[in-house]
Image (tube, rainbow, N blue to C red):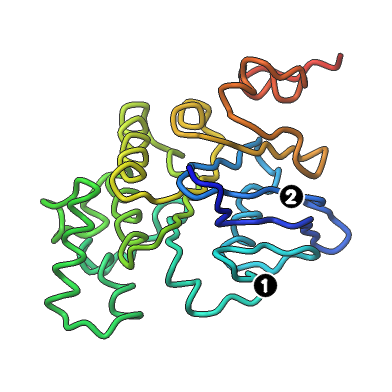
Amino acid sequence: MSGAALVEAQDVAQRFGDRTIFEHVRFSVLAGEIFVILGGSGCGKSTLMRQMIGLLPPTSGRVMVLGHDMRAPDADVLTRIGVMFQGGALFGNKTLLENVMLPLEMHTGLPREARATLAAVKLGLVGLADAANLQPAEISGGMAKRCAIARALALDPPLLFLDEPAAGLDPITSAGLDKLILDLRAQLGISFVVVSHELTSILTIGDRCIMLDRAARGIIATGNPRELRDKSTDPRVRAFFRRSAPVND
């Protein structure tokens, strides 16, 4: 990993009316790393990701992605990030190949044959070369998430955002998806920001993480997830990594 910061959250807060989701959130994501945002339900993980991809302006502070202020993202930065939404969010009336072709149709002037060729390459990268002509209703949940990653890769972005990639998957399928993420980082040099509460995946793929806490309304831990599991003295962090109820000590 180099020292270049691809993402910088600068004292970010999000409030809805008089309800504070989180505040004083500060972190950076470095080139080449897999950065995980973790925590229990309702702590604001997906809200923070929405800020990072330009879907939700923060109430205060700012998020810089690839040098762009995501309070007002322009077309340049939006074509240089890829996003896999929770569940995949594939278009049910299109084949997997057509789903992956969509970003190429929207953002390039390539002829259809070239778009189809590039989309087929991306499906091959995620192990779906033989499923190109299937529709989302004909595939498993794990395959749908792989296809969504292929679509996020369509424009060759240096940075991918994955929202709960392992959610709802059986352990074997989830492990295969973890391996895919690690392989893509190794093969393509892509950096990842991953929102997750799936402990096994966090420990497998994460280089660094921040842990959000609903009651604290912000970050309660930062670091390598395996080191946090083994060395943290915070009862909230220990409870998360041990899958146990927090102890008030």
Name the image quarter holding the C terminus: top right
Mark 2: secondary structure: strand
Kind of element beneath mark 1: loop
Tell me if 190 is positioned left or right of 136 in this view: right
Front tag of 2 and 1: 2
User: For the residue carrying disc 2, how many other residues have a C-alpha within 10 Å: few (<14), some (14-19), or many (20+)?
Assistant: some
Quickly name the residue at label 2. 26
Looking at the rendered structure, which numbered label has been put on residue 2? Answer: none
Between 205 and 151, the one nearer to me in the picture: 205
For residue 71, which numbered disc appears in the image?
A: 1
> In the image, what residue occupies the spot 45% across and 63% down?
81
Which of the two residues, 48 or 210, is positioned nearer the viewer here? Answer: 210
Q: Can you give x and y, in whole percent of width and height, for residue 169 in the image? A: 38, 36
From what the image shows, is residue 72 above or below residue 120? Answer: below
Would you place residue 167 above or below residue 236 in this image?
Answer: below
**In the image: residue 51, left or right of residue 193:** right
The residue depicted at 19 percent of the width and 66 percent of the height is 118
**Which residue is depicted at the point 55% across and 53% down?**
4
Classify residue 105 by image quadrant.
Answer: bottom left
